[in-house]
Image: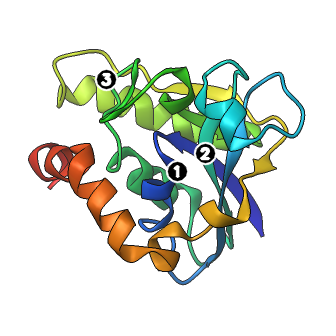
Amino acid sequence: MEKATFAGGCFWCMVKPFDTFEGIHKVTSGYMGGHVDNPSYEQVKTGTSGHLEVVEIEFDPALFPYSQLLEIFWQQIDPTDDEGQFQDRGDQYRTAIFYYTDEQREQAELEKTKLQDSQKFAKPIVTRILPATTFYPAEEYHQDFYKKDPEHYQQDLAQSGRVEFIEKNWK
């Protein structure tokens, strides 16, 4: 198994797109990139801990290559928004790819360059590519939120603007 960690705004919306494929063992909501040990959701949502909301994906690269994870990731976000994602504003909701190996970093940089060169978006691609740091799992009530509270999840997703953006820019 290998790990991949992506920040794509609200982690509730980032679990489901990865959670249904053979070769993906586990998707965990959490926090990465900050300066506070064992942060709570309450600390992270203030934007003062330095952490981003992320999903950590444990996957079997023989069944589901990292390049496919990157493809899914890009198609869940607005890679030109450096102020957050959709209705979630603030540094804690900015996009990032956290890499664990040089190979992951190289693949992420290549895909980012391809996306920028494609001119799909008029604005620059601002998603950061950063070395992975300590991953802190979010509180249990955040895990698999789309399964635990599907009505609340669908309502939040519908209000966010994410679905419309994906339909307009990625489909």
Q: Earlier in the sequence, mark 1 or mark 3?
A: 1
Which residue occupies the extreme bottom position in the image?
22
Q: Tags 2 and 1 in contact by the CB under 8 Å rule? A: yes
Residue neighbourhood size for the residue with mark 3, other residues' Cα within 10 Å, grouped as few (<14), some (14–19), many (≥20): some
| Image side of residue 94 versus residue 79, left or right | right
Q: CA distance from mark 1 to mark 3?
A: 18 Å
- Amino acid type at image mark 3: Thr
Q: CA distance from mark 2 to mark 3?
A: 18 Å
Q: Quick one: SS at disc 2?
A: strand
Q: Quadrant of residue 133?
A: top right
The residue depicted at 52 percent of the width and 68 percent of the height is 145
Q: CA distance from mark 2 to mark 1?
A: 6 Å
- Amino acid type at image mark 2: Val
**What residue is disc 2 on?**
54
Residue 128 locus on image (x, y percent) = 54, 24
| Image side of residue 36 versus residue 127, left or right | right
The answer to whether residue 40 is seen in the rendering is yes
Q: Earlier in the sequence, mark 2 or mark 3?
A: 2
